[in-house]
Image (cartoon, helix red, strand yellow):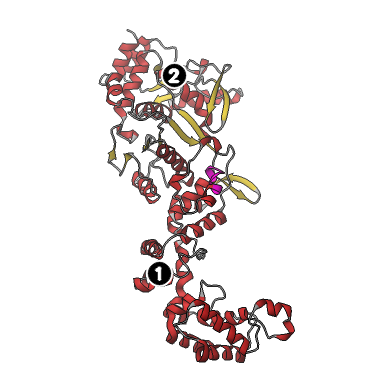
Amino acid sequence: MDYKDLANLIFPDAKDISYYEEKYPERNLKEGAIVTRIAPSPTGFVHIGGLYQGLIAKKLAEQTDGVFFIRIEDTDQKREVENGTNEIITSLNNFGFEPDEGMVSETEGKGNYGPYKQSLRKDIYQAYAKYLIAQGKAYPCFCSPEEIEQIRAKQESAKIRPGYYGVWAKCRNNTVEEMAEKIKNGDSYIIRFKSPGREDRKIKHHDIIKGNVDFPENDQDIVIIKADGLPTYHFAHCVDDHLMRTTHVIRGDEWLSSVPLHLQLFYEMGFKAPKYAHIAPIMKNDNGNKRKLSKRKDPEAAVSYYEEEGIPVEAVKEYLLNIANSTFENWRRANPDKPIEEFELQLNKMSVSGALFDMVKLLDVGKTVISRMTAEEVYKQASNWAKKYDSELVKLLEDKEYGLKVLGIERGNKKPRKDIAKWSDVKENISYMYDEEFYKDTQEYPYQVINDKEEIKKILNLYLEKYYDDKNDKQTWFDNIKELAGELGYAKEVKEFKANPEKYKAHVGDVSTVLRVALTKRTNTPDMYEIMQILGKDRIAKRFETAMNK
């Protein structure tokens, strides 16, 4: 009996690998086209780090006219959560991660290189495991979990490197006949890769981000097919990336130490290995110490957090590109109106150490992104968010025509308003434009320099009686406020007041603040002229009267 007979005994129904090599041929793409993927496991929420890797992978594929696909790695079925694949697809779709190929729902995929879910590729893995066994490069291991634990305990007590290798690989040197007999007797087993490596030899590897690195060779006889017939991650990724013709694997740098094993698997299988790019994790400043963003501690680690908060998709992507390439910020400054698709990402410009996550910076990006939108876009996105998360905002935005006027204040100018960083800010930033919200607000009017009641009444009354005219253009409107200020003993210009403060009660800016506060109960709002144009004389008069009565 030889290894081919043993392979047939273990996997009698597995096809010859030539069937799959023919079924999944080399892709017909232009030279330099990158084929890459995002390969999440359906074991919980999508981490922002996964989105970050996916953004880079998708960008590289797009800018080289390549292919970006989504593969679901669900071989660890004990950890799988219900509807996990749909959760992943939905989260990625929310961020515009429409793949060229891959899973599009829990059960459906698109593309010619599927299935794109590892649990549906069992026959493929078994064919390639059979191929390795037939070559004497893999073998059945009959060690029970208890025996494996005993080996580990002995290694630990002797302070020896743990693992199944060398003299510790008990089943490695069984004869073919011994293996066959155990299988025929019904003994349970798994399939291990027979590593040709030696730990005292080094391999040199060039990582696209990390540069040149060297490692000891892999000498571990790792499990490639588990007792349930499904592969381990290491074996599955090797077979899948070969058959799906992946050219670049973009993944977190926690996988860097697996490179010797992965390259060895590719080589022993006779495959060309993809290029690897190991990305540093996104870090967080925790009381002066850097640590990875944690699923348990940090709400912003979950991709769902950004949707719930209403941080625009474009803002998150811009921020992640900013982390990815230090050149992005200058590019954006030089091209404020260009879509991010036009920015060329370069892997060799990525940071080798982890970038710090900065929520303040992200929200600043959010303000800039929203400031570039039209009122129609803001209305649409804010309404869509509100339908899921804020019924009060839905009610405010019922009157679309009025909502567009409110959201259109100071929009489309050279310096548009930047008061909204996320959709959950919208209600707070526009509520004073709605009478039902304005009048139920019981807070004090936050008058500043001018806070004498009689003086405030004089300003408000005189403005309505003499200086308000809704037909005035903006310049005339402001000139009228200056005239009002002068009539009541305030400096018409701030510089006049600064030159002779003892000559005036205060200045025109302080008078404007009185009008703004009486109108909105706020000291800081977008353009007051536009606010007045929308409110109209009757509503302004009523608000001034309410302010005077208070």
Per the rendered image, the range of residues in magenta is 323-330
Q: CA distance from mark 2 to mark 1?
A: 59 Å
Q: What's the residue type where badge 1 is placed?
A: Leu
Task: Give the residue type that dot 2 points to.
Answer: Tyr
Q: Quadrant of residue 447?
A: bottom right
Tell me if I can see residue 158 in this picture.
Answer: yes
Q: Residue 325, image x and y in percent?
A: 54, 42
- Helix or strand or loop: what does disc 1 sit on? helix
The disc at residue 393 is: 1
In this picture, residue 357 sits left or right of residue 491: left
Q: Residue at point 46% right, 35% down?
A: 250
Q: Which quadrant does the N terminus fall into?
A: top left
Q: Considering depth in this image, is 436 or 532 the residue closer to the camera?
A: 532
* Any part of residue 549 in sight: no
Q: Residue at x 32, y 13 (%)?
A: 6
Quadrant of the image occupied by residue 113: top left
Q: Is residue 357 left or right of residue 381?
A: right
Q: Is residue 327 magenta?
A: yes
* Residue matched to label 2: 267
Q: Is residue 461 magenta?
A: no
Q: Residue at the spot x=54%, y=33% of the render?
A: 209
